[in-house]
Image (cartoon, rainbow, N blue to C red):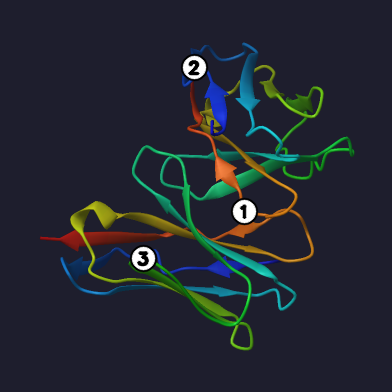
Amino acid sequence: QKEVEQNSGPLSVPEGAIASLNCTYSDRGSQSFFWYRQYSGKSPELIMSIYSNGDKEDGRFTAQLNKASQYVSLLIRDSQPSDSATYLCAVKGGSYIPTFGRGTSLIVHP
Amino acid sequence: GAGVSQSPSNKVTEKGKDVELRCDPISGHTALYWYRQSLGQGLEFLIYFQGNSAPDKSGLPSDRFSAERTGGSVSTLTIQRTQQEDSAVYLCASSGIARDEQFFGPGTRLTVL
């Protein structure tokens, strides 16, 4: 059973701070890793994908992957109230079907 | 370009009725997925289509659920004899060949009374 674990939160951070969202996965053969943002009542929106160990930066977002530790994280710098949402981690291995975590709720308060 | 589209956006039906939900993937995307998300819950995989290959139906919760994809493009998810526990948001996603990122449609909110 492939599992993707996320802390459900809520994670509460002040505006302007760095939000750190974490995800662990069980399948060592996983090759593709994704972060999605889901606003309440809306569908998931792709933020970033990462495939290699290390960091990948896109604007205020940085994804970090450590395959040895089976750990992927998302950092959001200069957090804004508009970043308040649920963040979903998804992991894909040999199967074409990704496994999604339950998501972490992020609240950025002014 | 146009994203994934789904219709209807909302569907209210009575218990026991059949419903059809439609998904139009991003042009050129060969892979299409259906998911279900109940209130406050995670994404539940239902079915996966890849090109002209046989679909992966391993996530369908019962034989009341079926899906087809015509011409490798538009997909229809059919739920027969709907039950109240079928009430959820049904999400469709598609992905291309070169990159395996999924892009989601806006979803169809199904309410079974």
Say which of marks 3 and 1 sits in front: 3
Do marks 3 and 1 share a chain?
Answer: no
How far across and how far down the image is residue B58, in percent? 78, 45
Where the N terminus of chain A falls, by quadrant?
bottom right
Quick one: SS at disc 2? strand
Q: What type is the residue that disc 1 sits on?
A: Glu
For disc 1, the marked residue is B101
Which residue appears at 71% of the width and 36% of the height? B28
Residue A81 vs residue A70, the one in the foreground = A81
For disc 3, the marked residue is A59
Q: Quadrant of residue B47?
A: top right
Do marks 1 and 2 share a chain?
Answer: yes
Quick one: SS at disc 1? loop
Above or below: residue A82 compared with residue B55: below
Dot 3 crowding, Cα within 10 Å, few <14, some 14–19, many 20+: few
Where the C terminus of chain A falls, by quadrant?
bottom left
